[in-house]
Amino acid sequence: MEHSGKDLNDYKSPSSTVYVSKPSKVIKIIEDVMLDISMYYTIFSEQIINQVEFRNSFSYRKVNQIKKLNLNSIDWDIDKNKGYIALAGYFWSGEEFDYIKYVELWEEIGSNLRVKTNKLCFPTVEEQFKLHKDYGELSMKSIIKKYNELSPGEYLFARLHKIPKRKIAESTLLSIFGGKVLKRGKWKFIDKREAVIFDNFINNVSLFKIFVR
């Protein structure tokens, strides 16, 4: 569906028109828009948000940033949307979303605008692990030590919760986790792209997403 874009051409209008290439894209477009709305109210101070001029012109500022960085999106088209785009739409790669770079872009925009912004409070390692289903069983001291050695990015915290009965499967997991003996509770940080190594062990290993900045 496509609208005329009249609202976007009227600088004082508070509404925006979004181009959607086909019905199957609607949910994805809504998801991108909601992510941007969440970041907008997170990073910018209430004083700035309440300024009508800032609100009405902010979409154009986002477009300029996308052009400057030469970013591309399958779902968003700057020309067709005539001034409104969702930054989130430029950080998808298939089903993977690059949250780290997305947040960094918002922080950069806030810095470039030279306005007072809210500092984004990225969750600490302990705050992230409190959401782990086995948090009470984890040795956080050892985990934090290893976490601090990781480079910025997205990782998976793999933890063994059931030892396989087959010896060959047990041997495979031991080679992944390391050590001499395979015991319940063994853990390891892996790059999220390496999750495939546990495809045959979904009943033995739990995977927990972790962000490092």
Image (cartoon, grey):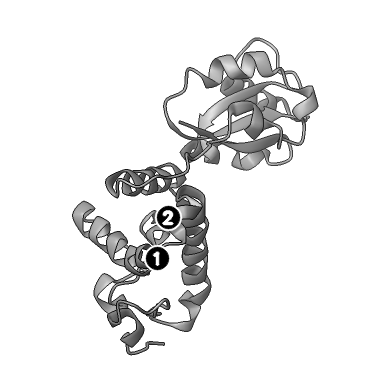
Image quarter (top left, top right, bottom left or bottom right) of the C terminus = top left
Residue beneath label 2, please?
A: 48
Left or right of residue 57: residue 162 = right
Other residues around mark 1 within 10 Å, as few (<14) / some (14–19) / many (≥20): some
Tally of numbered tags: 2
Q: Nearer the viewer, residue 178 or 8?
A: 8
Lower sequence index among marks 1 and 2: 2
Q: Nearer the viewer, residue 141 or 192?
A: 141
Res 198 seen here: yes
Left or right of residue 34: residue 132 = right
184 vs 39: above or below? above
85 vs 184: above or below? below
Left or right of residue 85: residue 95 = right
Amino acid carrying label 1: it is Arg
Q: Position of residue 157 (x, y in %)?
A: 60, 31
Residue beneath label 1, please?
A: 55
Residue at the (64%, 41%) spot, across then down:
200
Amino acid carrying label 2: it is Ile
Q: Residue 48's image quarter? A: bottom left
